[in-house]
Image (spheres, rainbow, N blue to C red):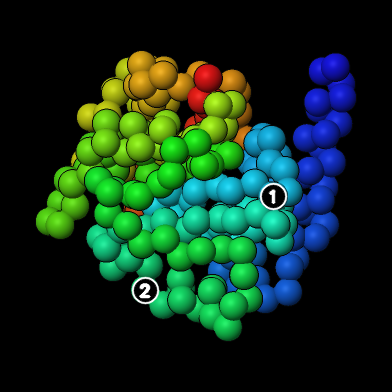
Amino acid sequence: MKALYLSLLAALSLQLSAADLNLSGRSAADLKRDLTSKPAETLALLPVKPGQQVLDLFGGNGYYSELMAQLVGPSGKVLLHNNQAYLKFVGDALPQRLKDGRLPNVVRYDRESDALGLTPNSLDGVLFVMGYHDFYHQSEGWAVSRDQVLNQIKTALKPGGYLLVVDHQAKAGSGHSAAQELHRIDKQDVIAELTAAGFVLKQQSDVLHNSADDHSLMVFDPAIRGKTDRFTLVFSKP
């Protein structure tokens, strides 16, 4: 059974590598990011199926939404979420990605985090990439409640639905203390919080691990930007 599961993961990874990463129209910036974000290996951790509905939470310019759109297929749907604060940093990249209906099964989903408006038991999966630490980061115009967001996600996920969390690793044992200045968070803190919120940890991967990152630099520092040590966690709703 385990061998079959691993072969299915490998098949999904190959599918994404061969077809979707080279999808016509993908930007040069996306292709460059593929080298460090390793989307084929990352998304292969998820039980994605055609026809599923997935939320890309705080999805930014839609890098992952575009790839997930290929995996859920024309009968599936990806909700590409941002709030107004996130949109200020996205710029023209988001409308450019969705221009002329080139991704018909990706829905731009602008909502504030305290009112996501998600239908209960409507989602097969949620992607939350590089955003969990922002629950503990505060700046002008930015304050997001962890409990509000997690409760809405849990309600919207179907039983057995998956939650992918990827974020910048902080020093072990630091909890969320590095979130404000370094935009990092300790993996164990995330696991503890999501477990307490009722999610079940199914898998963790070191696919985005970088031993050269000592976790001391802010993630936007030119010396480490785009190359941080990142943890990858997959949870499910019971």
Closer mark to the observer between disc 2 and disc 1: 1
Q: Residue at x 83, y 34 (%)?
A: 8
Q: Residue at x 56, y 63 (%)?
A: 106
Q: Disc 1 designates what residue?
A: 51
- x, y percent for residue 140: 12, 56
Q: Earlier in the sequence, mark 2 or mark 1?
A: 1
Q: Which image quadrant for residue 182?
A: top left
Q: Up-down: is 194 above or below 112?
A: above
Q: Which image quadrant for residue 205?
A: top right
Local SS, label 1: loop
- x, y percent for residue 59: 45, 55
Local SS, label 2: loop
10 Å neighbourhood of mark 1: few (<14), some, or many (≥20)? some
Residues at badges 2 and 1 in contact (C-beta under 8 Å)? no
The answer for how far apart the CA atoms under marks 2 and 1 are is: 30 Å
Q: Up-down: is 222 above or below 206?
A: below
Left or right: where 15 falls relative to 141: right
Q: Disc 2 designates what residue?
A: 91
Q: Up-down: is 88 above or below 159?
A: below
